[in-house]
Amino acid sequence: MDSPKQSENATAAVSSGHCPNELAHFPIIHPQPIHWGEMDAFNHLNNVVYYRYAESARISYLQALGMFDGSMVTVLAQSSCQYLRPVTYPDTLLLGVRCQRLGNTSIVMEYSYYSSAQKAIVATAEAVVVRLDSDGKNKLPWTEDERERLLALEATVEHTPKG
C-alpha cells in the first residue's frame, strides 16, 4: 500500500523522468493520489472518479501544449473506461495520456492508469474531444501550429498519433 511518502516518491519519479515501462510511450504522466473519500461502498475507487482523473490528465496534456489558456473551447464528445483491477486507498495512480488520433476538429485521447501500489495498469480509457469556436457552436479545425506542437510532444516518446 502507498503511504504519503510513497505518493511523494511517485510524484518525484515522474518529475525526474523515471516512469514505469508501461507508460514509456505516453508523453504526459499525471500523478494522482487516491483520497479516502473517493472509495465506494465496496471499499474501492468509485467508477466516476476515473473520469475526473482523466479530465485532470487531459488538462495537463493541453497545458503542456500551451492550449489551455482559456481561449480554446473544447467539448467532451465521448468517453469510456475499462476497469482492469480494483484500486483502494492509499495509492497513487500515474495516468499516462497521449493522442491516439488527431482529426481535423477532434482528438482521441488515450489514458492508461498505473497503480503505484500494485505496480500494474489498473484501467484504460479513451475520450473524444472536439474543438469549437469561441461561441461554442461550430467545430473549429486545429491550427497548423497546434498540430505541430502536438506531434512534437508525441515524438518525444516516439509515438505518432493516427491521422
Image: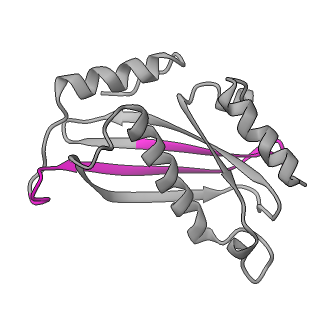
Occupied quadrant, residue 45: bottom right
Q: Position of residue 35 (x, y in %)?
A: 72, 66
Q: Position of residue 111 (x, y in %)?
A: 54, 44
Is residue 58 visible to the viewer in this orientation of the structure?
yes
Tell me if 58 is positioned left or right of 36 in this view: left
Which quadrant of the rendered structure holds the C terminus?
top left
Number of numbered discs overlaid on the protein picture: 0
Q: What residue occupies the far bottom of the structure in this picture?
A: 41
Read off the magenta span. Answer: 109-137
Q: Is residue 11 magenta?
A: no
Which quadrant of the rendered structure holds the N terminus?
bottom right
Residue placed most toward the observer, 33 or 104: 33
Tell me if 26 is positioned left or right of 21 in this view: left
Which residue is pictured at 40% across the width and 27% down the height?
161
Which residue is pictured at 76% across the width and 57% down the height?
85
Which residue is pictured at 77% across the width and 61% down the height?
87
Tell me if 110 is positioned left or right of 2 in this view: left
Q: Position of residue 159 (x, y in %)?
A: 49, 21
